[in-house]
Image (tube, helix red, strand yellow):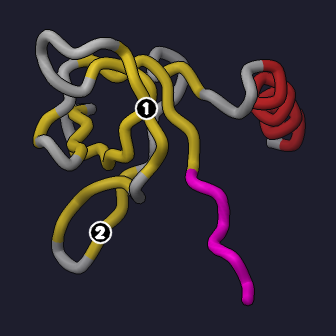
């Protein structure tokens, strides 16, 4: 739906590209036999007793995010990683 795409782009530009987890979650794909999302930039609480911070993580079925330290405590926002450099 073209109008839904336009609304999504407008919302992303309004929040510096950050997407609220309550509004939309990363798509999950088969990654060589593992069902998970692509790695995305997240914002939230990585581990219990940590402050909010940026986390590189992926999401698995059940809406659970995993970063370098294991399952993330509370992720509130996410955004896709930029494309890698060409040269």
For marks 2 and 1, give the one nearer the viewer: 1
Rendered image quadrant of residue 9: top right
Residue 15 location (% of width, % of height): 73, 20
Callout 1: helix, strand or loop? strand
Q: Nearer the viewer, residue 43 or 64?
A: 43
Q: Is residue 65 above or below residue 15?
A: below
Q: Going 21% across and 42% down the picture, which residue do you hit?
A: 66
Main secondary structure along the magenta-highlighted residues: loop
- Say which mark, if any, is on residue 54: 1
Q: Is residue 70 left or right of residue 24?
A: left
Q: Is residue 26 left or right of residue 47?
A: right
Q: Is residue 72 above or below residue 70?
A: above
Magenta range is: 81-87
Q: Is residue 66 left or right of residue 37?
A: left
- Say which mark, if any, is on residue 35: none
Of callouts 2 and 1, which one flags the residue occurring earlier in the amino acid sequence?
A: 2
To which residue does mark 2 refer?
A: 30
């Amino acid at each position: 739906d073209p109008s839904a795409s336009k609304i999504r782009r407008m919302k992303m530009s309004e929040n510096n590209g950050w997407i609220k987890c309550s509004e939309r979650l990363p798509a999950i794909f088969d990654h060589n036999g593992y069902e998970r999302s692509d790695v995305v930039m997240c914002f939230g609480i990585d581990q219990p007793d940590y402050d909010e911070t940026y986390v590189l993580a992926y999401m698995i079925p059940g809406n659970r995010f995993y970063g370098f330290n294991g399952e993330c405590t509370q992720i509130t926002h996410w955004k896709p990683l930029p494309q890698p450099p060409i040269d």
